[in-house]
Image (cartoon, rainbow, N blue to C red):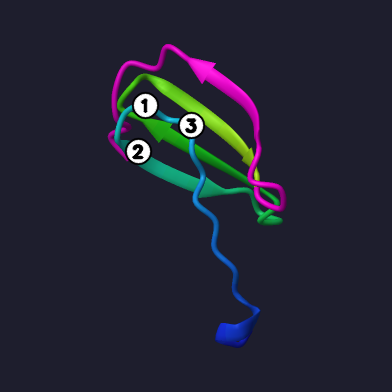
Amino acid sequence: MSPQDKSSKTLEGHSGSVWSVVFSPDRSTLASGSYNETVRVWNVATGQVEQTLEGHSGQSAA
């Protein structure tokens, strides 16, 4: 993939620092975990939040 083929987006929605991100195997979905105790699931193509999960209590030890 050439640099011209890459695009970037700013995904806005977390109100705290983002501690982790992971792409689905097909790279169509991104999950981001935030200090504000939420995980957001994003549609990569549209940049829209598909789901917000609330209540996680800290960073992973992984």
Q: Can you tell which mark lies on residue 2?
A: none
Q: Is residue 1 magenta?
A: no
Relative to the observer, which residue lies in front, 29 or 60? 29
Q: Amino acid at mark 2?
A: Val
> Where is the C terminus found, in terms of image quarters?
top left
Relative to the observer, which residue lies in front, 52 or 12? 12
Q: Can you identify the residue that label 1 sits on?
A: 15
Location of residue 56 by image quarter = top left
Q: Position of residue 49 (x, y in %)?
A: 63, 33
Q: Is residue 60 left or right of residue 44?
A: left
Q: Is residue 60 left or right of residue 47?
A: left
Q: Amino acid at mark 1?
A: Ser
Q: Can you identify the residue that label 2 sits on?
A: 18
Q: What is the spatial separation of the Cα atoms under label 3 and label 1, in whole angstroms?
A: 6 Å
- In the image, the segment drawn in magenta is 44-62
Q: Is residue 14 above or below residue 1?
A: above
Q: Can you identify the residue that label 3 sits on?
A: 13
Residue at the image position 66 percent from the left and 38 percent from the top: 48
Residue at the image position 28 percent from the left and 34 percent from the top: 61
